Amino acid sequence: MDWTDERVALLKGMWTNGYTARQIAEKLGGVTRNAVIGKAHRLGLSSRPTQVKRHTPLPIPHVVERHCQWPIGHPGTDEFHFCGKNAVPGKPYCESHCNVAYRRKDDNAA
DNA sequence: CCCTGATTCGC
DNA sequence: GCGAATCAGG
């Protein structure tokens, strides 16, 4: 399994958003949680509080959302805030964060 | 015991 | 650099 940009992006995206290595591994498919953790570690990530509490409000796709719900920083801290940029109609994120969250392998627009 | 992530070892 | 194995913590 070659770690392509989109796979790494998905890995980092899910990892950063509090997904467990198993969820990410299962999502990517063909990789074990060890591979995900190992890759994440190599990427410069690693430190992850076990089974991060659901205080990271993994943004739920809402109907008619107009502002990007992408969580920035840590909840409970002064740094925690949402992106708040104008999201695309029907999607919880702005175009850039939507791209990070829903990035597809065939989304490559040269 | 189960789960998690982190680190280390071998390929 | 990749993945599995192993270790450590919850």
Image (cartoon, coloured by chain):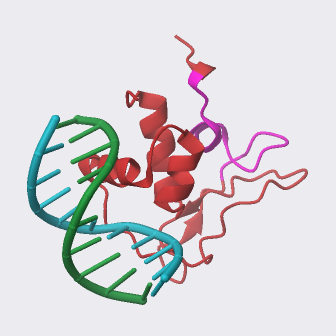
Chain colours: A red, B cyan, C green
- Vertical order, A93 against C6 (above or below): above
- Vertical order, A17 against A42 (above or below): below
Q: Is residue A94 magenta?
A: yes
Q: Which residues are magenta?
A: A85-105
**Horizontal placement of A90 versus A49: left or right?**
right
Percent x, y of residue A89: 83, 40
Percent x, y of residue C6: 21, 67
Q: Is residue A110 magenta?
A: no
**Horizontal placement of B5 versus A27: left or right?**
left
Residue at 49% x, 31% y is: A6
Q: Number of callouts in the render?
A: 0
- Please state which of residues A83 and A46 is positioned toward the viewer in this rendering: A46
Quarter of the rendering containing residue A81: bottom right
- Vertical order, A25 against B3 (above or below): above
Quarter of the rendering containing residue A94: top right
Residue at 71% x, 46% y is: A86
**Horizontal placement of A21 versus A48: left or right?**
right
- Please state which of residues A108 and A95 is positioned toward the viewer in this rendering: A108
Residue at 65% x, 39% y is: A102
User: Could you tell me which quadrant the N terminus of chain A lies in?
Assistant: top left
